[in-house]
Structures are given as C-alpha cells and as structure tokens.
Image (spheres, rainbow, N blue to C red):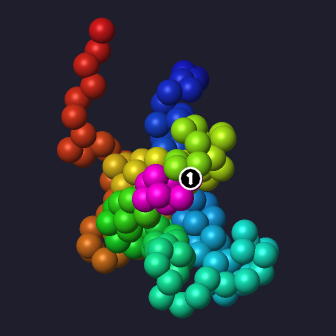
Amino acid sequence: MNFSLASTLRTARPLVQAVFRLVTGFLFACHGAASLFGVLGGSHGGGTVPTLQWPGWWAAVIELVGGVLVSLGLFTRAAAVICSGSMAYAYFSVHQPHALFPMANGGEPAVMFCWTFLLIACLGPGAYALDALVKREAITTADEGAAPVPTA
C-alpha cells in the first residue's frame, strides 16, 4: 500500500473545507444572535444593540445572516465577501484607533474573521453546500479555474 499524506489530505479537502465553512459561519452567526437577541452570553452582557443603530445593529445583522448563509453554503462567496468586509470595517473603525496591533486593541477576532471569510470566498464552499443545489451542478473536488502552481 502506498501511503501519501499529501494524497490523503487532498482527498479530505472538500470535507475539511465544508466543516471549516460550517464552524466559521456558525460562530459568526452566534455573535450576531448575541448582539441582536441578548442570547448566548455575548459581549453585550446579555443586552442587545438598539434597532437600526449604526453600525452595531447592521453589523449584527450581517453576522447573523451572513453566518447562517456561509454555514449552509448558500450564496457562499458573496456572503463571505460581505462578512469579511464587515470585519475589516470593524477592525479599522473600532479597534485600530485604540492601538496599532490587534493584541493591544482587542481586534484579534475581527482580524481572524476578516481573513477567514476572505479565504472562504476565495476557496468556495467545499462539499455539502446548498450552492450546488441552487446552481443544479455538483461541486467538484478539482481546482477548476485555479492558476497553475509553478514547480521548482
């Protein structure tokens, strides 16, 4: 038997990508639910953000709706781009003015979510996404359309 770690990881990629998408979207949706409904022990101490308040309420709506869409793999790329942009805005408008680095300004979650959603937008939803049903085509495991990687 010829065991290759790279081959095994390549085979597992669609499933791992789907689980990554699902967990990330779920955690993001939990932030939105905590802010909008005062549940899950969120950072608002059980309170909610005032309806239509800029930017808190709108950010919470993006977190909840975007997180659910990404979790389900529905309109994944568009939802992930919006979620990523929301977190970039949050970092630069809320956290960065207090200190330069995320460790000092409390912006690590915003930075991590920003880059995580950008990665999801670039890679796509992976396996088990509702996007495949909407488009009526199977999600392939091949890197279609990806630029070739030069070899040394």
36 vs 152: above or below: below
Residue 100 rendering spot, x and y as whole percentages: 54, 38
Left or right of 144? Residue 99 is right
98 vs 7: above or below: below
Residue at the farthest top position:
152
Residue drawn at x 67%, y 84% as measured from the top left? 48
Which of the two residues, 123 or 67, is positioned nearer the viewer here?
67
Which of the two residues, 10 or 54, is positioned nearer the viewer here?
54
Confirm whether residue 52 shows in the render. Answer: yes
Left or right of 26? Residue 141 is left
Confirm whether residue 17 shows in the render. Answer: no
Q: Which residue is mark 1?
A: 95
133 vs 125: above or below: below
The local crowd at label 1, few if under 14, some if 14 to 19, many if 20 or more residues have their Cα within 10 Å, is: many
Residue 126 rendering spot, x and y as whole percentages: 43, 55
Q: Quadrant of the N terminus?
A: top right
Residue drawn at x 52%, y 50% as measured from the top left? 97
Residue 119 rendering spot, x and y as whole percentages: 42, 48
Left or right of 7? Residue 32 is right
Residue at the farthest bottom position:
51
Residue 72 rendering spot, x and y as whole percentages: 49, 72
Q: Which residues are magenta?
A: 87-95
Residue 136: quadrant of the picture? bottom left
14 vs 127: above or below: above
Q: Is residue 118 magenta?
A: no
Residue drawn at x 47%, y 74% as measured from the top left? 55
Residue at disc 1, secondary structure: helix
Q: Quadrant of the C terminus?
A: top left
Which of the two residues, 11 or 110, is positioned nearer the viewer here?
110
Q: Amino acid at mark 1?
A: His
Magenta stretch: dominant SS?
Answer: helix
